[in-house]
Structures are given as structure tokens and as C-alpha cells.
Image (spheres, coloured by chain):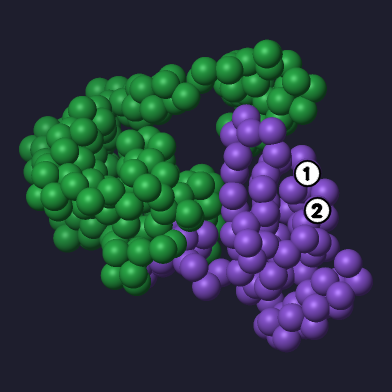
Chain colours: A green, B purple
Amino acid sequence: MSTALPHYAFTRGAIAVIPLSLACAPWGLLAGSMAIDAQFTPLQAQGLSAIVFAGAAQLVAIGMVKSGASLISIVLTTLLLTSQHLLYGMHMRPTLSSLNTRWRMSLGFLLTDEFFALVNHYDRQTFNRWYALGVGLTFYLIWNLFTLAGIVLGKSIPGLDQLGLEFSIAATFIALITPVVRDVPTVVCVAVALLCSVWLSYLHWESAVVVSGVLGMSAGFACKRLGVGQR
Amino acid sequence: MIYLMIVAMGLVVFFNRYLFIEPRLPVRLNYFPGGPSAQPEPDQPLPAGRYLRRGVDVLDTQRIDHRVIEHGAVLSAALVALIPGQKKARGVAGRRETSKK
């Protein structure tokens, strides 16, 4: 494990995550304003970001509350929507599982897409828990600050959810995915998922995203097994 | 209702995030990207031989039934661990398989 000074490593992590945090700003604003629009109280809206801390799941849940969905269906949807965290946890198990319970639970709670993008490439020797805490905690604080801003603005600016802020979700994920698309199987995976999601959405399939993801992963896996693009 | 939903969602998301970093979960995953083959660790049992030779994901079979690995289902390992009464059965099955080798 890296032994860099805690405050130095923490600051380095905090600085590293700031660009990604700013990219999520419109998303945080939307989470706050949409919650207010769905008749949540400010405390409930802030609590959603503080306790759940998962942008996509929050926005979908707010939409489901507005449409009168049951608690069970909201929880099950959340379980599926955030299931990529299972893979993140699996990937980071060698570095995180050796920490003590307090650190493990703290970093587990902070394990978001952005956290994973910045911390996943460290191995047991180079991993620094203070750096990871700097990344996760800074992102958590910024996310909650933007949610608070969304709550305030949602009360004063009507129709904030009509401004197209949700495109920041797509922009953020494009920024996260692009650096890891380095080999042919990954390119095939991304391309198949992209084309299928557009095509199936055009056909009005309700499960377009899930099916496209599975097809993309299958295509990438098949390429890897067939040795396509390997030297 | 809303508060209950927030707490339930929080628990579900935390479950997804935390499950595989819990060290007591009887799964160990090693990934060797691009490596020629995976090398067993000193305490690594060998029932996962097929997977060791392939150099892909290696699961610790010490505490789980090797049939889970034969099916290649990483997530199934987590489910097996959650089924009540599996702990004792896994230990017995694991020893039997090891002794056969």
C-alpha cells in the first residue's frame, strides 16, 4: 500500500475528482429540482442525495414516484440500475477488502462510477486509502452541494427540468468510458451497445438499454474469445 | 413513504457497492489481464484447475463448492453464500473434492 502523506494524498484525490464533479453539476441540479417538482420536501430531496448517492437511480426513482409506482418496484429498479457497482466492488476487492471495517464501509459507500474511474487502476502496492477518500468524499460533498443548489433553484426557477440538463448524464459517461476503449473487443462492445440502444429505442422497446448492454457485452466477450484484435 | 423509500434505496445501493468488498464473502477474484496463465497462490487449492490454466478469473475454492466455478458464474457464488445452511455443506463438499485430487 502506498505510504504517501495522508493530507497530501487526500488533496491529490480531491483535486483529481473536481473535473468529473463539475461535469456532474447539471445532474446534481436536476436531482434536486426534480425532487422538489415531484412534491418532495427539501429535507427529503437532500436526504435522497445524502443517503442514496446514485444519480441515475435517484432520477429514475423520482420519476417513478411521480408516476405512482410502488415501493417494491422502485427498490427493484434501483437494485438493477446500480448493479454495475457489483462489478466495481468485484474489481476493487483486492485493494479494498484488506482495509479495516471503518475504511471498507466508508469507501464502499463512496464507490461511484467516478470513484471507480479514478481509483480502479491502483493495485495493492500503489493504492492509497487517503487518495481514495479524497476522491470519494469530495465527490460526495460536491454532489450534495449541487443537489442543494437544485433544491433552491427548483423552487425559484420553474421548468428547470425542461432545460435539457439530463444530457450531462450522457456526457459524463462518455468521458468515463472513452479512456478505457483501447482494444478491439472493447470497441466492438461499445459499438454494438451503442447501435442496438439507438435501434431498439427507435423501435420503442422498453428494455432497450438492458438488452443493448447484454448484446454489447456478449459481442465483446465473443471477440475476446475468438482472439480478434490480439497481437 | 418517501423516507422509507430513501432508506430502502440507500440500503440497496450500499448492498451493491459493498457486497464484493466484504472480506468474509467466500469469493476471491484474481484477474490477470493479458497474462499467459494464472499462478496459484501458496494456499490456493487446485479444484479450479481448468480456470487456472486458462489464465482468466480465478476463484478461491477453499470455502465454496467447486461446481459454482465450473459453471463460471461469479454472481452465483455470492448467492450460494447467502443460502442458509450452505456453510456446512460447502466445507464437506470442498474436502471431498480436494481429497479426490
Q: How many marks?
A: 2
Place of residue A188 in the rendered image (x, y in percent of width and height, measured from the top left)? 64, 17
Q: Quadrant of the C terminus of chain A?
A: top right
Label 1: element kind:
helix
| Residue at the (58%, 17%) spot, across then down | A183
Q: Is residue A225 above or below residue A76?
A: above
Residue type at numbered disc 2: Gly
Q: Which residue is mark 2?
A: B49
The answer to whether A10 appears left or right of A210 in the picture is: left
Place of residue A170 in the rendered image (x, y in percent of width and height, measured from the top left)? 39, 25
- On the question of residue A67 being in view, the answer is no
Place of residue A69 in the rendered image (x, y in percent of width and height, measured from the top left)? 48, 55
| Residue at the (82%, 49%) spot, across then down | B50
Label 2: element kind:
helix
For the residues labelled 2 and 1, say whether their Cβ atoms are less than 8 Å apart: yes
The answer to whether A110 appears left or right of A189 in the picture is: left
Residue type at numbered disc 1: Arg
Residue B92 occupies quadrant: bottom right
Relative depth, front residue between A213 and B44: B44
Q: Which residue is mark 1?
A: B53
Residues at marks 2 and 1 on the same chain: yes
